[in-house]
Image: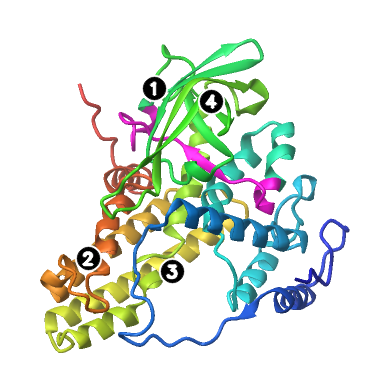
Amino acid sequence: MTDTTATRPGDGSVPGLDEFEAGARTFLDANAERRRQETFVWGKGTDDVGLFPERTPEEERADVERARSWAQLVFDAGFGWITGPPAYGGRGLSAEHDRRYRKVASGYRTPSLSVFGIGLGMVAPTILSHATEPVKHAYLKPMYRGDLVACQLFSEPAAGSDLASLQTRAVRDGDEWVITGQKVWTSGAQVSDIGEIICRTDPDAPKHRGLTGFVVDMDASGVEVRPLRQMTGGASFNEVFFTDVRVPDSHRLGDVNGGWTVALTTLMNERAAIGGGGGGLDHLGSTRLRQMARAMGRADDPLVRQKLASLTINERVAHYSNLRAMAKVAVDQLPGPELSLAKLALTRTMVETSDVLSSMLGPLLVADTGRWGTYAWSQFVLGVPGMRIAGGSDEVLHNIIGERVLGLPKEPAPK
């Protein structure tokens, strides 16, 4: 494959948007196939609509290697971290340059980079905001180049959406910290090289004030990753055990006992990634549902038509709300509670989609008859509860919106 760009990264020049777009097109033409116009036709092609990947370990490793090779090629061509600070390996260009590349790249068939989604969408922005200079230099460029995969180690068995109640301990020992405890629901831990972890460092302080963040080596002695089997059959999540895992103080994120601020940075970026990343009709295609209605003989059913119209309207409203939130992010403002709205809108659309599917498919949703486009939707329906928890449960997000957007009083603490 050929590595060709109009302007090399790091040479100090700032290409105009048209010049930059031409360089991106030249690179993609040399290294990828153009995406053909595809029209969805009921009964043809794959009917896979699962929300979570269902892969064997061998398939997973192969996907990671394809993603890594493509990410390295893209980065070396100058399109891997377009808006990033040059001091840490970025190209230092504008958000509009980044949007131009993404728009052009969407017209080509390229390997999925979803394995890097958590690292680049949540962990890297936190490292950029809170890590020491050595850690920024050690990890940011390799993460954006695809050399490293990162995961987020927040939730615990007794502290899921109530993150401040976590109990994983970090005890200082000279220039190191010793971490002991358990994390759960960690996506991608099985393929990750590093992880962002929040630990309790002062058990006597109020729960929000005794936390500290760290970057931990997932291959360090004492780290054990165990897959969690989902009701879909796959194992996209993990529980991770830490037994006397040593982390240098240089890998601390932010101040000692200042981990709540670090966690909020990650969580807001997480909701931006989840809420703004599609899903529901935007991901699965309203066309597929409309054609299903015709195939099931329900296209003239007024209740089904009303539900499909409601889904389409909700998806468009959520899309415009996401654009407003992303515009704030694009000018380097910290994502705010409006992203909780985006994430809630996504899961609400998914729940309503499940309701439509149940009304149209009936027993075909739970019994595999071999009929195309029917039982396959069970993967979607079974995945929705997980999406309602990921990035903060619906209930916690309702509280955030009530308190921070509507100005309602805080929910009373349990006695």
Q: Nearer the viewer, residue 359 or 147?
A: 147
Q: Amino acid at mark 2?
A: Ser
Which residues make up the magenta segment? 142-164
How far is disc 2 from disc 4 in space, using C-alphas? 41 Å
Q: Earlier in the sequence, mark 2 or mark 3?
A: 3
Is residue 340 toward the left or the right of residue 150 in the image?
left
Give the mark, 1 or 3, whose residue is nearer the N terminus. 1
What label does residue 167 carry, if any? 1
Q: Secondary structure at mark 2?
A: helix
Alpha carbons under labels 1 and 3: distance apart: 39 Å
Instruction: Report which quarter residue 192 is drawn in.
Output: top right
In the rendered image, the residue lying farthest to the front is 58
Residue at 55% over, 51% down: 121
Colour scheme of this structure image?
rainbow
Judging from the image, what secondary structure is the residue with disc 3 in?
helix
Residue 281 position (above or below residue 393) = below
Q: CA distance from mark 2 to mark 3?
A: 23 Å
Question: Is 155 one of the magenta-colored residues?
Answer: yes
Query: For the residue marked with disc 3, what is the amino acid?
Result: Tyr
Mark 1 to mark 4 CA distance (whole Å): 16 Å
Real-space Cα separation, disc 2 to disc 1, in angstroms: 36 Å
Reading the chain from its start, which is encountered first: label 4 or label 3? Answer: 4
Residue where numbered disc 3 is placed: 320
**How many tags in the picture?**
4
The residue pinned by badge 4 equals: 258
Query: Residue 7 vs residue 230: left or right?
Result: right
Compared to 94, does 266 lie above or below?
A: above
Q: Specify whether 414 is left or right of 192.
A: left
